[in-house]
Image (cartoon, grey):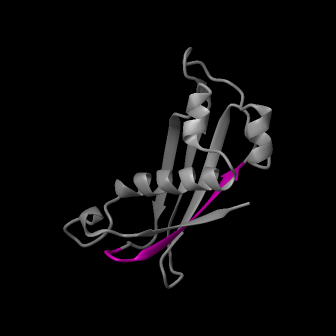
């Protein structure tokens, strides 16, 4: 199941060409991912309070068309594949006109905060996330 997060492009996020700078997309995707989890009843804070952290292992971005200042972006985020120790999030970005702008995948993994060793996602979180 996917979740759509809306973000309005701010002037400071644009480069001299007037486009959203590519580095900003990582922030957009983190915000969308965080809100997706929150919509499922899971927050990063609650996970961290239980000693579970989620470092990013990899990111892959594809850009089709540039987002510009004041665009209202719709970022559709979903979890893809099986989630055990790792979790892959897929993103699709469109603007207010429905034009496809970009897509991306981020891979995160679950780590015990004290030992810094990978762990399996606890079953109660799997249930909340519908896995």
Magenta segment range?
A: 68-80
Residue closer to the observer: 11 or 21:
11
Image quadrant of residue 8? Answer: bottom left
The reply to whether residue 53 is in sight is no
Judged left or right of residue 74, residue 8 is left
Image quadrant of residue 111? Answer: top right
Q: Residue furthest top?
A: 115
Q: Is residue 31 above or below residue 69?
A: above
The reply to whether residue 104 is in sight is yes
**Quadrant location of the N terminus?**
bottom right
Q: Residue at x 44, y 76 (%)?
A: 72
Residue closer to the observer: 131 or 128:
128
Pinpoint residue 113: horizontal percent, then vertical percent.
55, 22
Q: Is residue 109 above or below residue 59?
A: above
Image quadrant of residue 7? Answer: bottom left
Residue 76 belongs to magenta span: yes
The dominant secondary structure in magenta is strand
Pinpoint residue 61: horizontal percent, then vertical percent.
48, 55
Q: Residue at x 30, y 70 (%)?
A: 19
Residue closer to the observer: 74 or 34:
34
Pinpoint residue 30: horizontal percent, then vertical percent.
48, 50
Q: How many marks?
A: 0
Q: Residue at x 56, y 14 (%)?
A: 115
Pinpoint residue 129: horizontal percent, then vertical percent.
74, 48
Q: Is residue 5 above or below residue 84?
A: below
Q: Residue at x 59, y 18 (%)?
A: 117
């Amino acid at each position: 199941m996917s979740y759509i997060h809306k973000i309005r492009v701010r002037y400071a996020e644009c480069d001299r060409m007037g486009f959203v700078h590519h580095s900003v997309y990582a922030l957009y995707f983190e915000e969308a991912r965080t809100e997706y989890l929150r919509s499922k009843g899971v927050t990063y804070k609650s996970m961290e309070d239980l000693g579970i952290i989620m470092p990013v292992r990899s990111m892959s971005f594809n850009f089709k068309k540039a987002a510009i200042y004041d665009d209202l972006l719709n970022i559709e985020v979903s979890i893809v594949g099986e989630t055990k120790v790792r979790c892959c999030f897929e993103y699709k970005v469109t603007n207010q006109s429905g034009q496809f702008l970009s897509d991306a995948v981020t891979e995160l993994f679950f780590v015990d905060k004290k030992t810094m060793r990978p762990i399996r996602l606890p079953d109660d979180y799997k249930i909340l996330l519908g896995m």
